[in-house]
Image (cartoon, rainbow, N blue to C red):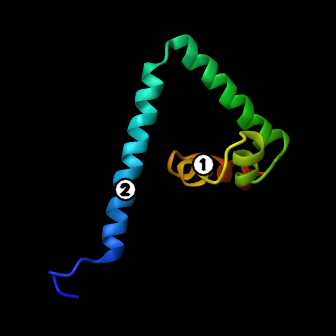
Amino acid sequence: MNEEQNDPWQDFSESYEKAMKEIEQRQEEYWNSLSKDDQLKAFCAVVRRIVQAELKDKGSYRWALYDVFGFGPEAYVQGMECGFMALHNSIIEKE
């Protein structure tokens, strides 16, 4: 492939990274728009669900996303990107 031709995988990779950075930026803006009280409520609600999925149910990554949190397939990649799959795997691997 010469320099004039675009590598479709490189184009995809760059588009993916840009989209994930935009999503993360929107998530952080949302978090920062919350009051400290609302941040604490959200934090506790999320941790409670993680404890349910990971420590009580000992479910899969998909179980946590789909059954405990009630998300659909759109959450799979975002969960990976924010580190939830790594967290899930670190809990499962230690057991």
**Residue under label 1:** 75
State the mark number for residue 37: none
**Image location (x, y in percent) of residue 37:** 56, 11
Local crowd at mark 2 within 10 Å, few (<14), some, or many (≥20)?
Answer: few
Residue located at (45% from left, 27% from top): 30
Position of residue 63 in the picture relative to residue 35 (left or right): right
For the residue labelled by badge 2, is the local secondary structure a helix, a strand or a loop? helix
Does residue 22 lie above or below 3 as drawn? Answer: above
The answer to whether the residues at label 1 and label 2 have Cβ atoms under 8 Å apart is no
**Residue under label 2:** 17
Does residue 14 lie above or below 91 as drawn? Answer: below
Amino acid under disc 1: Ala
**Image location (x, y in percent) of residue 12:** 36, 67
Measure the C-alpha gap from mark 1 to mark 2.
16 Å
Seen from this angle, which residue lies furthest left? 4
Seen from this angle, which residue lies furthest bottom? 1
Closer to us: 87 or 81 = 81
**Image location (x, y in percent) of residue 75:** 60, 48
Position of residue 53 in the picture relative to residue 21 (left or right): right
Instruction: Looking at the image, tell me whether mark 1 or mark 2 is earlier in sequence order.
Output: 2
Residue located at (15% from left, 81% from top): 3
Which corner quadrant of the image does residue 41 belong to?
Answer: top right
Q: How many marks?
A: 2
**Image location (x, y in percent) of residue 16:** 39, 59
For the residue labelled by badge 1, is the local secondary structure a helix, a strand or a loop? helix
Seen from this angle, which residue lies furthest right? 57
The N terminus - image quarter: bottom left
Position of residue 2 in the picture relative to residue 58 (left or right): left
Amino acid under disc 2: Glu
Local crowd at mark 1 within 10 Å, few (<14), some, or many (≥20)?
Answer: some
Residue located at (62% from left, 46% from top): 87
Residue located at (67% from left, 49% from top): 72
